Each structure stands twice: as C-alpha cells, then as structure tokens.
Image (tube, rainbow, N blue to C red):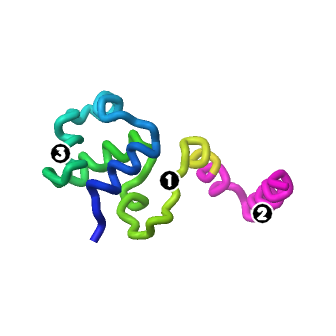
C-alpha cells in the first residue's frame, strides 16, 4: 500500500514547493493540501493529478510502488518527448552523443 500523505509531502518538499505556492499554482486550498499530507483527506484522482502536474509528476509515476522513482524535470520531459518522435537511427545517434558528453 502506498503511503500517499508522506510520499506526497516528500515530493512537494523535494520539488521545493511550499504549501502556499502549490495551492496558488493548482487552485487547491492550502487547508486541503495540509489535510492530504496529514492523511485526513484522501484526494480524488482529479485533485491529485492537478497537484502532481504542478509538481512535474504524473499520477502513474507517483503511484509506482518503487521508492527509487525519478520525477523528470520539465527539461527532461521535453527532451524525452523530442527523442520519442525521432527515427530509431537518429535516436541512437543522440544517445551515443549524450554518452560521449557525459565523460
């Protein structure tokens, strides 16, 4: 079972969001966000998706039971989406270039 309150609070903190900022960006009340983090309210899928979207995460990433899940930044998400539409040869070439740049 996924510990939504603690996992959500950790993600929010890891992303550097205050409850106030998340409330303003998601249009979900601060009080409701606090209740989610205390385990007093179970958010609907719609509300959780709104909150996670502001934090740069998807519902499937968040609900994945693997504690080592990495939440891509906006840049990483854009990069991934760009690579997905490339022909296989170009995608492989880009991967090789990235590996060379890493060293």
Of 86 and 15, nearer the camera is 15
Q: Is residue 54 above or below residue 92?
A: above
Q: Taking 44 as reference, is 26 left or right?
A: right
**Eye-nearest disc, 1 or 2:** 1
Residue 96 on image: x %, y %: 82, 60
Residue 79 on image: x %, y %: 64, 48
Residue beneath disc 2: 92
* Disc 3 + disc 2, Cβ < 8 Å: no
* Residue range corresponding to the magenta coloring: 80-103
| First of labels 1, 2 by sequence position | 1
Is 24 in the magenta?
no
C-alpha separation, residue under disc 3 versus residue under disc 1: 23 Å
Q: Taking 10 as reference, is 92 left or right?
A: right
**Eye-nearest disc, 3 or 2:** 3
Residue beneath disc 3: 35
Residue beneath disc 1: 71
Q: Residue at x 28, y 58 (%)?
A: 4
Q: Residue at x 43, y 50 (%)?
A: 57
Residue 14 on image: x %, y %: 46, 46
Instruction: Kindly state the secondary structure of the residue where label 1 is placed.
Output: loop
| First of labels 3, 2 by sequence position | 3
C-alpha separation, residue under disc 1 versus residue under disc 2: 23 Å
């Amino acid at each position: 079972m996924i510990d939504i309150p603690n996992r959500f609070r950790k993600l929010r903190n890891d992303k550097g969001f205050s409850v106030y900022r998340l409330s303003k960006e998601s249009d979900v009340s601060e009080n409701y966000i606090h209740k989610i983090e205390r385990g007093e309210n179970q958010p609907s899928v719609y509300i959780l998706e709104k909150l996670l979207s502001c934090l740069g995460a998807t519902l499937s990433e968040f609900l994945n039971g693997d504690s080592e899940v990495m939440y891509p930044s906006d840049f990483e998400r854009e990069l991934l989406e760009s690579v997905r539409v490339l022909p296989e040869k170009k995608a492989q070439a880009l991967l090789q270039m990235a590996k060379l740049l890493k060293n």
